[in-house]
Image (cartoon, rainbow, N blue to C red):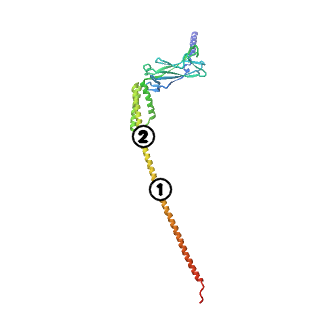
Amino acid sequence: MKKNVAVLSSVMLTMLIVASSIRPAQALIDDWMWLDPDFRGFDDFYGTDVIAYTQGSTATLAVTVDNTIPMLPDMLNVSAVIVGFDWGANYSSTEVSMDNPYQLNSGEPRHTFAVTFTVPAITVASNMFLHVYTIYVEYVNATTGPKQRIDTFVDSADYFAVYSSDQGTAMAIKEAIDLYYTSLYPFSFADVEAQIIYNKGYAEFLRGETAYSNGDFTTAKTRFQSASTFLDQAFAKESTRSTTREDAETAYYDALANLTRIQADAAAKEANARLTEANATMTEADAALVSADANLTNAYGWLAFGLGWILIGVGVIIYGLRRPKPSA
């Protein structure tokens, strides 16, 4: 029984020692990001999401180191930020070194370091499978004088792809075409010939996807280029038809506007003619009114003349009656 207790105590002590030696390695490397890759997303050949750079291109990894984690030193002197790949190469940030460490303290507890390198050829880093990479952050005991490395924090991932030249070109063309087909669906061209050309391009695109999934990147590139050409031709054909139609519609509406203007001019002339006729009628009416006034004046004159003779006659009669008669 005592032997069992001793063994159990020994095991527990060992576990405590191991637990006390474990450091929060994952937490110190707060985050990292690959900057401006040639492709980021789902790759049909690998069957998963990848970060990809074409062979010979420049890759940059941004690593953020955090010193706000409990149990870490108040001042962390970062002496190296390294990314190591499964093809046997390590790449280091030029911002820090053993002789020139970067101190993270309460004034600046977090900092992002850049690791930049040239992506090797596919003869060194195969494009037939994804690569595993590991990030190392080392820190030392001081920033000046003799230094000693205290510890190294580690994190890793396994989705890095190295593209061949044809593979990179094929994927770039595919991405561009994907945007067109996604935005156009279910767009239908008004021009029949343009629709036929578009369908040819889509068929080439599907053949390119099949070739790419099978790892035939050269054929995939050729198919995608052909699809892109067909797509450009379809748009050019549709654009020409649209321009012709717009010109015809413009001519139609111009003619319609001219006809409306001619009709308006004719209506205006007809209105002017009617106005002239109305003015003439009014002039005739005025003349008739003047004539009527003259006739009325003449009638008044004859009436006065007749009344005058009547008065003269009455006067003669009165005079004859009142004149003294001669004696017998």
Outermost residue toward the bottom? 328
Image quadrant for the C terminus? bottom right
Label 1 residue SS: helix
Residue 250 can be seen in this image:
yes
On the image, the x and y values in percent for residue 227 come to 40, 31
On the image, the x and y values in percent for residue 136 come to 52, 18
Nearer to us of marks 1 and 2 is: 1
Q: Residue at x 59, y 81 (%)?
A: 319
Q: Residue at x 44, y 46 (%)?
A: 254
Name which of mark 1 and mark 2 comes first in the sequence: 2
Q: Residue at x 49, y 60 (%)?
A: 279
Outermost residue toward the top? 3
**Amino acid at the residue labelled 1:** Asn
Which image quarter: residue 201? Answer: top left
Marks 1 and 2, how far apart in space? 43 Å
Residue 137 can be seen in this image:
no
Horizontally, is 145 left or right of 85 in the view? right
Residue corresponding to mark 2: 243
Instruction: Identify which residue, 42 or 313, lies in the foreground.
Output: 313
Q: State whether residue 267 is above or below residue 156.
A: below
Instruction: Identify which residue, 128 or 265, lies in the foreground.
Output: 265
User: How many neighbours does mark 2 have within 10 angstroms: few (below 14), some (14-19), or many (20 or more)?
Assistant: few
Residue corresponding to mark 1: 272
Q: Residue at x 44, y 33 (%)?
A: 180
Outermost residue toward the front? 326
Label 2 residue SS: helix
Image quadrant for the N terminus? top right
**Amino acid at the residue labelled 2:** Thr
Horizontally, is 3 left or right of 123 in the view? right
Instruction: Identify which residue, 68 or 213, lies in the foreground.
Output: 68
